[in-house]
Amino acid sequence: EDLLLSSLVSCHMMSYLYVCAQKGIEVLEYSDNAEATLEVFDDGSGRFVAVRLKPKVKISNSDKIELAVELHTKANQLCFIANSCNFPVLHEVSCEGN
């Protein structure tokens, strides 16, 4: 479970940094405290029901905060791992300028 969650966090971050670079947004800090919701069945098996990424980003230009937040949607569309999941990968974004 931890490795799948870590993979989603890493893939989203790399996709996000890529789209930020394309738009001229300098990311100074990036962290994520993601959470997963699991469903466990009586036989001991289970599955992921949803993942909630919680990226916290600091950018160099406060004037681009709105765009920086919007780019998480594009990053999610580019993320190979999120695109391979059969559960929703949601985002609770926090962004501040320097």
Image (cartoon, rainbow, N blue to C red):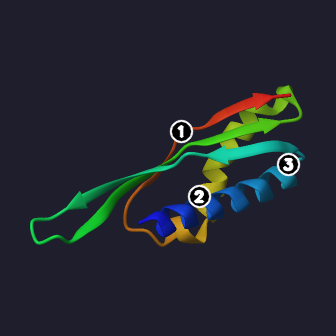
Question: Mark 3 or mark 2: which comes first in sequence?
Answer: 2
Mark 1: few, some, or many residues within 10 Å (few <14, many ≥20)?
few
Query: Pointer 3: what residue?
Result: 23
Of residues 32 and 59, the one nearer the viewer is: 32
Quadrant of the frame with the N terminus? bottom left
Among the 4 quarters of the image, the one containing residue 50:
bottom left
Amino acid type shown at disc 1: Glu
Relative placement, left or right, of 85 versus 92 is left
Residue at 75 percent across and 29 percent down: it is 96
Q: So how many labels did they put on this image?
A: 3
Query: Pointer 2: what residue?
Result: 9
Q: Secondary structure at mark 3?
A: loop
Of residues 21 and 7, the one nearer the viewer is: 7
Q: Is residue 44 above or below residue 67?
A: below
Of residues 85 and 67, the one nearer the viewer is: 85
**Which is closer to the viewer, label 3 or label 2?**
2
Query: Pointer 1: what residue?
Result: 92
Question: Mark 2 or mark 1: which comes first in sequence?
Answer: 2
Residue at 70 percent across and 60 percent down: it is 15
Q: Is residue 36 above or below residue 64?
A: below
Among the 4 quarters of the image, the one containing residue 17:
bottom right
Amino acid type shown at disc 2: Val
Q: Is residue 7 above or below residue 16?
A: below
Counting from the top left corner in percent of width and height, residue 87 is at 37, 61
Relative placement, left or right, of 54 versus 97 is left
